Image (spheres, grey):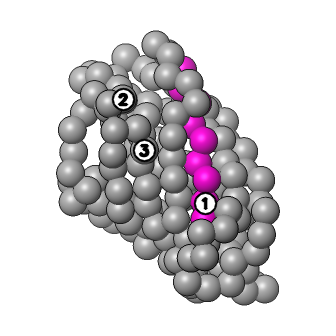
Amino acid sequence: MIWKRVLTLDELNATSDQTLVANLGIRYTRLDDDTLEAEMPVDPRTVQPFGLLHGGASAALAETLGSMAGFLTSAEGQCVVGTEISATHHRAVTGGVVRGVCQALHLGKTSQCWEIAIYDERDRRCCTSRLSTMLLG
């Protein structure tokens, strides 16, 4: 298991109260030994003017997952900040719910790299994101 901090899904979701995460409807749904997952609705909060899932909303889901995963792998007294994010969009999504799956690519003493794959309801990959984070403290 890669996590140094132990939180339940309810506790993880409670950290999002009154934040962008809650406003976008992002909810953590799964936490296992090396994977963190969350879902986000594709609705008026998360689409662009042409009715497609907004790339920025996908990036927000990815950053949410990677940042929380980074926090969960940090020690007491440390904090995690994102330093770079990229997102490659593979297919359009017009409705339903998307699911982000976050896994570590690199866990160093001061830097981390996370891959976040975003899937539609038919389990087709619609976005691949990479988030780099730095551990401070």
Instruction: Say what amino acid the circle numbered 1 marks.
Output: Ile
Q: 9 or 44: nearer the eye?
A: 9
Mark 2 highlights which residue?
A: 2
Crowding at mark 3 (Cα within 10 Å: few <14, some 14-19, many 20+): some
Element class at badge 1:
strand
On the picture, is 60 further left or further right than 77?
A: right
Cα–Cα span, label 2 and label 1? 21 Å
User: Which residue lies at the image location 51% right of the left edge and 40% below the top edge?
Assistant: 103
Crowding at mark 1 (Cα within 10 Å: few <14, some 14-19, many 20+): many
Quarter the N terminus occupies = top left
Up-down relation of residue 50 to residue 78 (above or below)? below
Element class at badge 3:
strand
Magenta part, dominant SS: strand
Q: Which of marks 3 and 1 is nearer the N terminus?
A: 3
Q: Which label belongs to residue 22?
A: none
User: Which residue lies at the image location 24% right of the left edge and 23% below the top edge?
Assistant: 76
Give the percent coordinates (x, y) of residue 57.
61, 65
Answer whether residue 123 is visible to the viewer in this image: yes
Q: Earlier in the sequence, mark 2 or mark 1?
A: 2
On the picture, is 108 further left or further right than 34?
A: right
Mark 3 highlights which residue?
A: 35
Which image quarter: residue 9?
bottom left
Up-down relation of residue 21 to residue 73 (above or below)? below
Mark 1 highlights which residue?
A: 118
Instruction: Say what amino acid the circle numbered 3 marks.
Output: Thr
User: Which residue lies at the image location 56% right of the left edge and 24% below the top edge?
Assistant: 106
On the picture, is 37 further left or further right than 13?
A: right
Cα–Cα span, label 3 and label 1? 13 Å
Q: Which of marks 2 and 3 is nearer the N terminus?
A: 2
In this picture, which residue range is highlighted in magenta?
Answer: 111-119
Which image quarter: residue 3?
top left
